Amino acid sequence: MSSRISLQETGNLLLQAQKIVLCCHVSPDGDTLGSALGLMHILSRLGKDVTVFVDDEIGRGFGFLPGIEHCRRPEADSKVQADVLAVIDASSFDRVGIVGEVVQAPFVLNIDHHISNTEFADYLYLDTAAAATGEIICDLFEEMQWQHDEATALCLYTAISTDCGSFRYSNTTRKTMQRAALLLDYGVQPSIISDNLDMRTRETVELLSKVLPTLTFAFENKVAYISIAHELYNKDIQTDSFVSYPRYIEGVDIAIMFKAVEEKVTRVSMRSSHTDVAQIALSFGGGGHLRAAGCTIYAPLEEAQKQLLEAIRKVL
Ligand code: AMP
Ligand code: MN
Ligand code: MN
């Protein structure tokens, strides 16, 4: 169990530290990267020695984020001493990769918004009503009276905008928009960020053309899924947007993308209109939100499909 702390206490824990390691989750998205980088900018400005670790490849598309060049991948068998390890936008410790072994800190702080948070950290600031961890970081700026600049604003706008689907998803609230609106005062141009986030490589679109024919329906068309067979899988090709194709089909409640990242390891992304998919993901050791969740099933593609559909049968 974590000790649940207030925003003020969260800010103070960071202020009391000198050497701070910020950690993003694996398969890094705009929320974990933007939130960590926004924090990195302000904490560096406050004179802290800040390292940002991501134990994964970072999509080329995030190259526009100010400070992204400071994100480092931890080296196995290395040791890094810090006063605090702050895990950003991750709901369980396995999502930090090897950072947990590399970083030696007296305590772990977790700032997160996932309903599936496992309370792995010593200290936790969790706000499941926040559309993005970026929204929480904006709250933290306000609470601590930290001033934004163009870099923090750009990073935090990207974080918020990523997780609420550019203010379209059901997690978008008045506060989500207010936070984002405030960031516009520091020079953020929404169209430039959305152009960056929506930009795809030719390889992504070519892969999409091979993945769409796998579209399959189940449970009276309430479930639709697409699959990336291991032969087609390429870690360098972004596929995050693919799940929106089964997601936006009339009558579909649960959309799934299966990705055979290894012969016997299948990554699952789920989106839903009604059903709590975080619960389903949790039953496979994953997690997420009510309407967007994911997990990894340690089985070949077809076996993983069978297992997940069986779990869905039970909740539908
Ligand atoms: P994705 O389908 O990868 O975009 O993930 C959707 C949501 O589920 C995000 O909020 C992720 O943080 C969360 N999620 C995805 N995979 C996992 C996992 N293996 N464990 C915990 N949370 C996950
Ligand atoms: Mn995330
Ligand atoms: Mn998030």
Image (cartoon, helix red, strand yellow):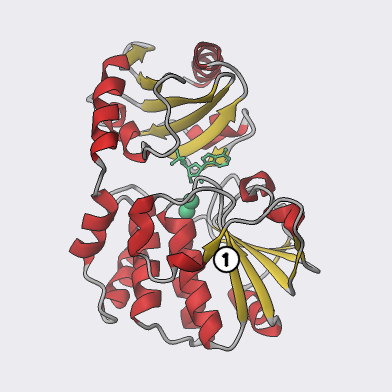
Residue at image position (40%, 61%) is 159
Quick check: 269 above or below 141?
above
Q: Residues within 10 Å of mark 1 (few under 14, many from 20)?
A: many
Which residue sits at x=47%, y=60%?
A: 33
Residue 21: x %, y % from top left: 65, 68
Up-down: is 167 above or below 285? below
Question: Residue at horizontal 54%, vertical 82%?
Answer: 44
What x and y, as percent, mark residue 273? 35, 34
Q: Amino acid at mark 1?
A: Val
Q: Nearer the viewer, residue 85 or 271?
A: 85
* Residue at the farthest left position: 191
| Residue 184 at x, y percent in the picture | 26, 75
- Quick check: 296 left or right of 28? right
Quarter of the view holding residue 208: top left
Furthest residue toward right:
106
Answer yes or no: is residue 131 visible: no
Question: Which SS class for mark 1?
Answer: strand
Q: Quadrant of residue 13?
A: bottom right
Where on the picture, by quarter, is residue 182? bottom left
Total numbered badges shown on the rendered structure:
1
Residue at the disc numbered 1: 52
User: Is residue 193 visible to us here?
Assistant: yes
Residue at 37% across / 57% down in the picture?
A: 62
Question: Which one is nearer the viewer's eye here, 139 or 207?
Answer: 207
Left or right placement of residue 116 versus residue 181 in this view: right
